[in-house]
Amino acid sequence: MTTTFPEGFLWGGATAANQLEGAYDAEGKGPSIQDVMPHGIMTPPTDEPTPDNLKHEGIDHFHRYAEDIALFAELGFTVYRFSIAWSRIFPNGDEETPNEAGLAFYDRLLDELDKYGIEPLVTISHYETPLHLAKTYDGWVDRRLIGFYERYARTLFERFGKRVTYWLTFNEINSVLHAPLMSGGIWTPKAELSEADLYQAIHHELVASASATKIAHEVDPAIKVGCMVIAMPTYPLTPNPADVLAVMNADHANLAFSDVHVRGAYPGYFLRTLRDKGIVLDITDADRELLKNTVDFVSFSYYMSLCEAAEGGEVGQGNILGGKRNPTLPESEWGWQIDPVGLRIVLNQFWDRWQKPLFIVENGLGAKDELVEVDGELTVVDDYRIAYLNDHLVQVREAIADGVDVLGYTWWGPIDVVSASTAQLSKRYGFIYVDRNDDGSGTLQRYRKKSFGWYRDMIASNGATLKQ
Ligand code: BGP
């Protein structure tokens, strides 16, 4: 069997603006929902930005991007996924004209990537809706968000379309069902949000995503647009058909979003869900036409799998999506169950379903790291991260051997960033350690962990150094 990956396979890492840039109010940037979520998704937002938010300074990437990208180049990255902060470009979200200083920052960042020949992969909206859109419009519940997003996306394509081929419309769009504020900028508390409003918001996001795809192709036919979803393979807890049916229903809830993106229309099972709930969505003929603008590729995050059961089973800790705990798998320090084989399964499932090129744009292990001295240098001996990465990549290679078309792989958080779910810095994913702690202390200095050398050598060998 071949031990390497296809030639031209893209290797890199992925980040999101709100988790690393800092400079949350610099050069005309407006506040985003993240500025009122200092303690992550389990705690209600504050009314206004409060000083105890680690994301306000992040890891100061806004000022240190050149140093960070130089480290990515040293790792041998051929692709870097990052997001553009919507509120850096449109501080309130509903302005007519963009903030030039915000655009100029991303020009500088792209210049740096150019220098090393690193392909950019840009997320247009990664959990950072401008706060004004959340508070004034209730986020995506309001149809006017489509127009604001279209203006924002067009601004980006026109400014950066010649420099950026790969774009993602919304990060983990299927998470809106579970995290309406973080994912959909919906200000109404989840417990008070009606299902009708939630599904209407989903519809607006799907139309906006398809519309952005259309605009991108008009601006430059060479641009490739992908959707981005949480991939969560779901296994039946037992062979009982009722559990298998529970899996089918959970899969439908997750896959509906990419079904619409790839097929250009709502699947029958989704329409049935709406009927069963007594929801009649406001869908115009123009919406239906727009939805036909389908994506060029499908991208996803993969951290873990879960089980489903009609009844019983222990509730599992999930990356946003819920489910039952799998009694056969180990778990991370944050309770996310580790399942490398699930990545091969989901790659096959997605390829069989859509025959669209796939891009793994997030995968990683959040762990507590300890900075120690080895041979006079400060580092982290993160063999656990190396093992996780090795085992997942072996499964990617298996899926490619199965015939799946995979464009590339970007590890989540190649440099330590603030966690999306818990807002901690101590939940570290990086190959690069950043000296900043949960209480905000630290020098922000960067250190190479043991996994840094491992990933660099693996990329240089295009997978030949992986251990089966
Ligand atoms: C995904 C998000 C990322 C990221 C990652 C790890 O759901 O797209 O923004 O942070 O998960 O999750 P966490 O930071 O909660 O550990």
Image (tube, rainbow, N blue to C red):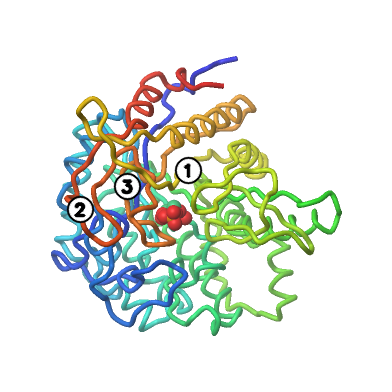
Is 208 placed above or below 70 here?
below
Is 348 placed above or below 308 here?
above
Give neighbour class at mark 3: few <14, some 14-19, many 20+ (Cα, 10 Å).
Answer: many
Please report contact status of discs 3 and 1: CB closer than 8 Å, yes or no: no
- The residue that disc 2 covers is 442
Q: Give the mark, 3 or 1, whose residue is nearer the N terminus.
A: 1
Depth check, front residue: 136 or 316: 316
- Choose mark 3 or mark 2, whichever is in front: 2
Please report contact status of discs 1 and 2: CB closer than 8 Å, yes or no: no
Q: Is residue 22 left or right of residue 39?
A: left
Name the residue rendered at 62%, 48% in the picture.
Answer: 305
Number of numbered discs visible in the structure rendering = 3
To which quarter of the image does residue 453 belong?
A: top left
Residue 331: image x %, image y %?
Answer: 56, 47
Residue 49: image x %, image y %?
Answer: 27, 76
Q: Is residue 116 left or right of residue 178?
A: left
The amino acid type found where label 2 is placed reads Gly
- The residue that disc 3 covers is 416
Residue 92: image x %, image y %?
Answer: 27, 75
Q: Marks 1 and 2, how far apart in space?
A: 27 Å
SS for tag 2?
loop
Q: Is residue 427 left or right of residue 331?
A: left
Depth check, front residue: 46 or 158: 46
Name of the residue lying farthest toward the right: 240
SS for tag 1?
loop
Q: Give the mark, 1 or 2, whose residue is nearer the N terminus.
A: 1
Please report contact status of discs 3 and 2: CB closer than 8 Å, yes or no: no
